[in-house]
Image: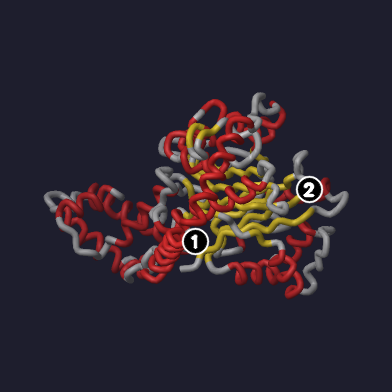
Amino acid sequence: MTQSVLTIVADVGPGREAELAAALATIGGDPASNAILPLGQFDQLHFASLVLADGPEVRTPKLIFESNVDGNTAAWLTTLSEEAGGGLDALFRGSPGYPGSAAPARLQAWLAERVVRPGAFHIGATGRSVARIHQEQLLHDRISGFLAAEDEAGGLNGLTPNAVRTKVQAFARNEPTLGWAATKPPPRETLMEKARHRLRAAAVVAAAVVLAPILVPVVAVGYVALRVKEKTDPVRQTPPDPAHIRRLEETEDLCVFEGVGGPRLLAQNHLSSVIPVKPGMLRAALLPLVLFVLNLLARIIFTRGKLGNIPSIHFAHWSLVDERRHLLFLSNFDGSWESYLGDFIDKAAVGLTAVWSNTKEFPRTRNLVREGAADGPRFRQWARGSQCATDAWYTAYPDLTMTAIDNNSAIREDLFRGLDDQEAVTWLRRL
């Protein structure tokens, strides 16, 4: 199925910062049901965020509207233009050229002109729609409740794992709310989608081989220039402003739910950053190339819920914005900021260093991918200092981790598949 990751980036109209900040506060206070832009009305929307970027290195304050949706970009912009005109007016009124919501077609065209495509993106729940994610959580809950009741009544005594599964299958067929579960789910990724991405990678490799006589000397010269830059580029030496940290903390750890026995458990979080790209032709060429390679890997390898070895990312993307002067990073992830940065350092430092070493004040690197993010204390200090506060953030399934979503999908995918006893044991342990 088609899933789209996109960002609308628009200049804020002159003198509108205070008015816009008030609107964002209202939306952020109740993202799903607020009176300005109730994001919960959109059945196809997984995650969304709104960020007012107005740092000292951003030439003009910008409003960043992130969307992670089922369907294509054009369909999403049509939905926004036709169903959320009043909310878009509150956000974009006064932006250069903004046509207003009275003419949806013109509004859609204006939005389309300001869509920034990601240079690299990751989708954790590949091929799972918002509706499917909710359905599969319902399936998990209903089966778990059925098994608990059967166990309490002694109905599972002496049964083999597959005999227990037979009872579960009968329950699922006869439970009115689970009628859809008897239908084989669509694949998370179709054969055509897999083939398209692999053919693209093969074409890139073939082109590199053909152009090797030209590329090898270019790469050699570029490598020498890179090593000089890596030894001389300024790095961040001071901790971030405490006031900035307090502002970030006010917008974090908002997505919590009650765990068993009452403790509040953190399910999801959001991170945003707008970071100046290092000047010069080398970085201008190198950063898009790194993003291209990372995106290719994400389409071929990282399609089963993990980015590198990080299992906690629902949606994330990098985009070049502000005439390619800044690198935008937006991520929707499980757990706390500290745990997320810890995963970056321990499990994905090489790839992240390759990207962010092209931005200002990043910790000292070597050979593009070495050191950098692996330098935990300096990387944490740099990451915190470059982070933006998220003004409003919406999630369609706030109590579900990426691991839980994948687990629920595996339950549904194997519900009516023939399993041996050991496989049946593994399946039952998912409940």
Question: With respect to residue 319, does 255 lie above or below?
Answer: above
- 155 left or right, relative to 289: left
Callout 1: helix, strand or loop?
helix
Where residue 168 sits, quadrant-wise, is bottom left
**Residue closest to the eye, 178 or 390:** 390
- Label 2 Cα crowd, 10 Å radius (few <14 / some 14-19 / many 20+): some
Where residue 105 sits, quadrant-wise, is bottom right
Question: Upstream in the sequence, badge 2 or badge 1?
Answer: 2
User: Which is closer to the viewer, label 2 or label 1?
Assistant: 2
**Residue drawn 31% across the image and 62% down it:** 413
Distance, label 2 to label 1, CA atoms, is 32 Å
Q: What residue is disc 1 on? A: 130
Residue 133 appearing in the image: no
Question: With respect to residue 179, does 240 lie above or below?
Answer: above
**Residue drawn 75% across the image and 69% down it:** 107
Q: Type of residue at label 2?
A: Pro
- 19 left or right, relative to 27: right
**Residue drawn 61% across the image and 32% down it:** 382
Q: What residue is disc 2 on? A: 61
Q: Which mark is residue 405?
A: none
Callout 2: helix, strand or loop?
loop
- Label 1 Cα crowd, 10 Å radius (few <14 / some 14-19 / many 20+): some
